[in-house]
Amino acid sequence: MRPLRILAVAVALAAANCLPGALRAQEQQPSPESMAAAQALFALLFTHGFATLNAQAVEAAWPGIESALRTQRPNIDSATLADLRREFERIRLARLSEVVKDIPAIYARHLNAEDMRVLAAFYGTATGTKMLQAMPKVLPEAFASVLPRMQPMMAETQDSFLKLLHERGLLN
């Protein structure tokens, strides 16, 4: 019975790490004005950041795709490969656009319309433009640094909290 209790507490802790903020945020309905500002802001961010990230992903994936195509069709010409690469990038960007379509609503639930207009204006400045250009480089590097440490951090948090529950006599 004890392992089941520990498992139940562990599952509850894991869920607590992910769900409450997302559930609370979904309850709020943004105003039409906030949605319009969020869509404008996100369009700007998508055009600069996501499109650049997509191009980087295509750059990394294309050599393997081209190699597979050349294996299947050794006589494939460079113009056809260039056209296929453009199509691959276009298809991938369209799918990415579909995947992130709900992000403006998230912005609108957490920021007001004026804040988003100010942010959009900032991104129109020299510093904002520099930030937009840097983010596609910064984000993958930041995620690569943080992601490997997330699972151990969650396990350590869970272990520490279970230990605390034991020490306080709240878990046998």
Image (cartoon, rainbow, N blue to C red):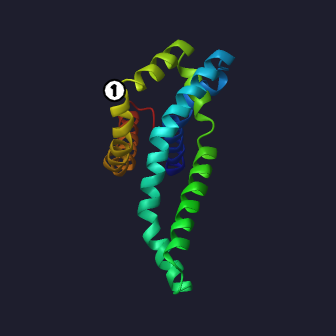
Residue 137 x %, y %: 34, 45
* Residue 35 location, quadrant: top right
- Vertical placement of 30 versus 63: above or below? above
Residue 127 x %, y %: 32, 26
Q: Nearer the viewer, residue 44 or 137?
A: 44
Q: Nearer the viewer, residue 80 or 99?
A: 80
- Vertical placement of 121 versus 105: above or below? above
Q: Is residue 21 left or right of residue 119?
A: right
Residue, x 53% and y 44% (percent of image)?
Answer: 11
Residue 31 appears anywhere in the view: no
Which residue bears the numbered disc 1?
A: 126
* Residue 22 location, quadrant: top right
Residue 124 appears anywhere in the view: yes
Type of amino acid at the residue the image marks with label 1: Ala
Residue, x 46% and y 53% (percent of image)?
Answer: 55
Number of dots carrying numbers: 1
Residue 99 x %, y %: 61, 46
Residue, x 54% and y 49% (percent of image)?
Answer: 4
- Vertical placement of 55 versus 166: above or below? below
Residue 39 x %, y %: 60, 28
Question: Which quadrant is home to the C terminus?
Answer: top left
Q: Nearer the viewer, residue 126 or 72?
A: 126
Residue, x 31% and y 48% (percent of image)?
Answer: 145
